[in-house]
Amino acid sequence: MTRRRWIADEVSGEAAALTGDNARHLAQVLRARVGEQFDIAADGRVRLGTVTRVADERVEFSLGEEVAAQSVGAVRVELLLAVFKFDRMEWAIEKAVELGVVRVTPVIARRTDAHLASAAAKRVARWRKIAKEAAQQSRRADVPEIAEPVKLKSALEVTAADSGQRIVLAESERGFSLVEALKAKPQATSILVAVGPEGGWTPDEVELFSEKGWVSASLGATILRAETAAIAALAIASAFPTDTQ
């Protein structure tokens, strides 16, 4: 029987603990008992955890041998995701984590709704909670980073030094597909994918990407919702190295 996996909220040497919602669920719903064992992801490793103390708001474990972790792939895949309707964005973040993304940077684009742009910073804690729950559910050993929202120009400045493949999905691009873009740099150890807001990137934003060394690519002839484009792109990017090496 597969043991349930939890991502530790606290780690200290050979001990770990769950707090908050995870602890309440384990203590009150699953009724964990001292001596029970679970897989505990701590500091990027998954170890056998034995319950040593149970309280409503805290469950503690002693950490034992390392167990096999679910791999998220040899290539780091990051996502620059323009802020769009929050319910759809939450879904996109959840699925991106399941697909192995290592970092999501919410971006304020020219066509990001002003109300969403102003409220985005207040949503980060929720996005991080969703990311942690998705990582735990998908049996990852880590929780991907959900960065603070930034304007597009700032995001591109931060990624300018990245030596990996940087690809912006652009509706204006028809002749160069995402797969072709990935094939153009098959040895890249990291892939950054940028997905625009509802309405897409503006022409000057696409030009800014080009100036910063990004390659424009397409997912096909149909126009996809932002969340659909993000998931389709991540699925292709995550699978591509395995298919081609």
Image (cartoon, rainbow, N blue to C red):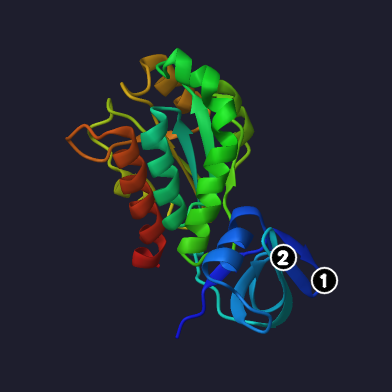
- The answer to whether residue 41 is left or right of residue 201 is right
Residue at image x 50%, y 47%? 130
Up-down relation of residue 29 to residue 181 (above or below): below
Residue at image x 36%, y 59%? 240
- The answer to whether residue 241 is left or right of residue 74 is left
* Quadrant holding the C terminus: bottom left
Closer-to-camera residue (88/108): 88
**Residue tagged 2:** 17
Rendered location of residue 74, percent (x, y): 51, 64
Quarter of the image for residue 19 reads bottom right
Q: Element at badge 1?
A: loop
**What mark, if any, has residue 13 been given in the picture?**
1
| Amino acid found under the numbered disc labelled 2 | Ala
Whether residues under marks 2 and 1 lie with C-beta atoms below 8 angstroms apart, the answer is: no
Up-down relation of residue 169 to residue 119 (above or below): below
Callout 1 crowding tier (Cα within 10 Å): few <14, some 14–19, many ≥20:
few
Closer-to-camera residue (89/217): 89
The label nearer to you, 2 versus 1, is: 2
